[in-house]
Image (spheres, rainbow, N blue to C red):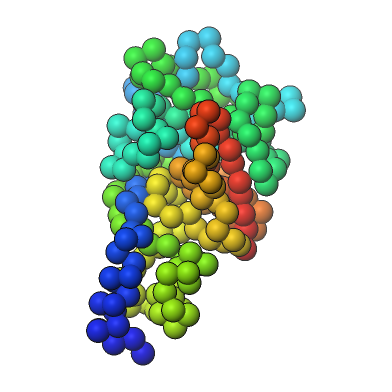
């Protein structure tokens, strides 16, 4: 059993590694199309005359839309981005690079004033809409990252004890630490760091209840990687 003194020691070891994150909570409600909001599924927004993206002749899945002004934590990769819309093909591969002809499409908009709701193709209307409500949290590492910082006994207690205050958030999240489902490669490298993760939900499942991670390169290309247990 870890004593209070040991908990203080663990807190001291983990303090340099605590990262701020915005954790999203999904609320099922009718979509308001008066202005763009952070949402999961539903109608996404775009420029006038901009079409809904397709891949292999079929409309893409509206995965997640972020309104950056609503985020309590904003990674450097989202600087200058007012709205971000992420679309995926239903057969998105384990790794993908964004592009209008790709299985991953990430659209960025610097201003909201010229945007309008895109017309949803018939094949996407079954993708249910949820409003995303954000809250700021302190996020702690997990998996091998945690075991590199703490002793095996300490790391095991942090991961398994219900009384541990050192929470790693395994959900829809901007910033923080990517959830280590297999190995800690989701955070990427300095030239294309991790930005956000999206967990499986009612609109799309990544493998067996896996998670999709988005990274952005210095050249502003977006990359996705999904992992499953």
Q: Is residue 221 above or below residue 117?
A: below
Q: Residue furthest top?
A: 49
**Front one among 94 and 194:** 194
At 39% across and 26% down in the image, what residue appears? 81
Q: Is residue 12 above or below residue 116?
A: below
The answer to whether residue 66 shows anywhere in this view is no
Q: Quadrant of the N terminus?
A: bottom left
The answer to whether residue 68 shows anywhere in this view is yes
At 56% across and 24% down in the image, what residue appears? 120
Describe residue 31's horizontal placement relative to residue 100 as left or right: left
Residue 87 in the image: state x and y as whole percent: 57, 32
Residue 29 in the image: state x and y as whole percent: 39, 40
Where, by quadrant of the figure, is residue 158 drawn? bottom left
Q: Residue furthest bottom?
A: 1
**Front one among 66 and 40:** 66
At 42% across and 74% down in the image, what residue appears? 150
Where, by quadrant of the figure, is residue 209 drawn? bottom right
Q: Residue furthest front?
A: 190
Q: Is residue 153 above or below residue 78?
A: below
Q: Residue furthest right?
A: 56
Residue 85 in the image: state x and y as whole percent: 48, 30
Residue 55 in the image: state x and y as whole percent: 69, 28
Where, by quadrant of the figure, is residue 78 drawn? top left
Q: Is residue 63 above or below residue 180?
A: above
Q: Quadrant of the C terminus?
A: bottom right
At 47% across and 69% down in the image, what residue appears? 148
């Amino acid at each position: 059993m870890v004593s209070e003194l040991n908990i203080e020691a663990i807190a001291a070891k983990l303090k340099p590694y605590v990262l701020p994150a915005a954790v999203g909570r999904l609320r099922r409600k009718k979509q308001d199309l008066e202005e763009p909001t952070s949402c999961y599924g539903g109608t996404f927004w775009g420029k006038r005359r901009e079409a809904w993206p397709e891949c292999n002749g079929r409309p893409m899945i509206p995965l997640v839309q972020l309104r950056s002004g609503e985020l309590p934590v904003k990674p450097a990769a989202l600087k200058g981005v007012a709205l971000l819309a992420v679309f995926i093909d239903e057969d998105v591969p384990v790794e993908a690079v964004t592009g209008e002809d790709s299985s991953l499409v990430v659209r960025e908009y610097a201003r909201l004033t010229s945007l309008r709701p895109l017309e949803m193709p018939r094949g996407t209307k079954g993708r249910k809409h949820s409003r995303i409500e954000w809250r700021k949290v302190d996020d702690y590492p997990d998996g091998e990252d945690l075991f590199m910082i703490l002793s095996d006994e300490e790391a095991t207690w942090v991961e398994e004890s219900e009384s541990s205050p050192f929470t790693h958030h395994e959900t829809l999240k901007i910033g923080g630490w990517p959830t280590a489902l297999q190995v800690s490669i989701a955070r990427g490298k300095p030239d294309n760091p991790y930005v956000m993760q999206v967990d499986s939900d009612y609109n799309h499942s990544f493998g067996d209840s896996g998670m999709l991670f988005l990274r952005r390169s210095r050249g502003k290309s977006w990359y996705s990687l999904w992992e499953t247990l």
